[in-house]
Image (cartoon, grey):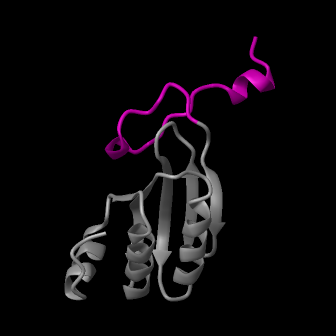
């Protein structure tokens, strides 16, 4: 018999194979920020915690993204920022992510092709 407490302890699988195999048990992702175009979540993991961005990042939400990411540093000393769900990013987004990653112990993964191209156009090597 499964109680509601037991159900909360059932394994959750992470959908991103690029981050590696999902642990037998992983906490659900917590929403750190959401607006009409962007969603930022965090899964606290053994080792680096994973911050996932989904949607569009532009001048209208890049400052809030930067603040949200800085608050995420309080969650874990080491972070992985997964950009696989980003469908659009402008120069403000790339700069916000670059500045955050330069702050230490951050690995940015799954950078979309469009963002890589934009970074090369503005003279940034990578995130």
Residue 23, horizontal then vertical, whole percent:
47, 29
| Quadrant (top left/top right/bottom left/bottom right) for the C terminus | bottom left
In the rendered image, the vertical position of residue 16 relative to residue 105, given as above or below: above
Specify whether residue 37 is in view: no
Q: Which residues are magenta?
A: 1-26
Q: Nearer the viewer, residue 116 or 104?
A: 104
In the rendered image, the vertical position of residue 98 relative to residue 6, given as above or below: below
Image position of 107 (left or right of 58): left
Q: Is residue 28 magenta?
A: no
What residue is at 42 percent from the left and 76 percent from the top? 99
Residue 47, horizontal then vertical, whole percent:
46, 40
Residue 70, image quadrant: bottom right
Q: Nearer the viewer, residue 57 or 99?
A: 99
Q: Nearer the viewer, residue 97 or 78?
A: 78
What residue is at 50 percent from the left and 34 percent from the top? 13
What residue is at 58 percent from the left and 60 percent from the top? 72
Residue 65, image quadrant: bottom right
What residue is at 63 percent from the left and 25 percent from the top? 10
> How many numbered circles does the render carry?
0
Main SS category, magenta section = loop
Residue 31, horizontal then vertical, whole percent:
64, 57
| Quadrant (top left/top right/bottom left/bottom right) for the N terminus | top right
Specify whether residue 46 is in view: yes
């Amino acid at each position: 018999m499964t109680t509601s407490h037991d159900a909360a302890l059932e394994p959750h699988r992470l959908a991103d194979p690029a981050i590696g195999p999902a642990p037998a048990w992983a906490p659900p992702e917590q929403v750190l920020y959401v607006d009409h175009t962007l969603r930022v979540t965090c899964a606290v993991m053994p080792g680096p915690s994973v911050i996932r961005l989904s949607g569009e990042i532009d001048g209208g939400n890049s400052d809030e993204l930067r603040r949200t990411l800085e608050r995420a540093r309080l969650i874990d000393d080491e972070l992985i920022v997964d950009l696989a769900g980003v469908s659009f990013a402008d120069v403000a987004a790339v700069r916000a992510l670059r500045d955050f990653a330069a702050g230490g112990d951050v690995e940015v993964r799954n950078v979309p092709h469009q963002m890589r191209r934009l970074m090369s156009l503005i003279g940034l090597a990578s995130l």
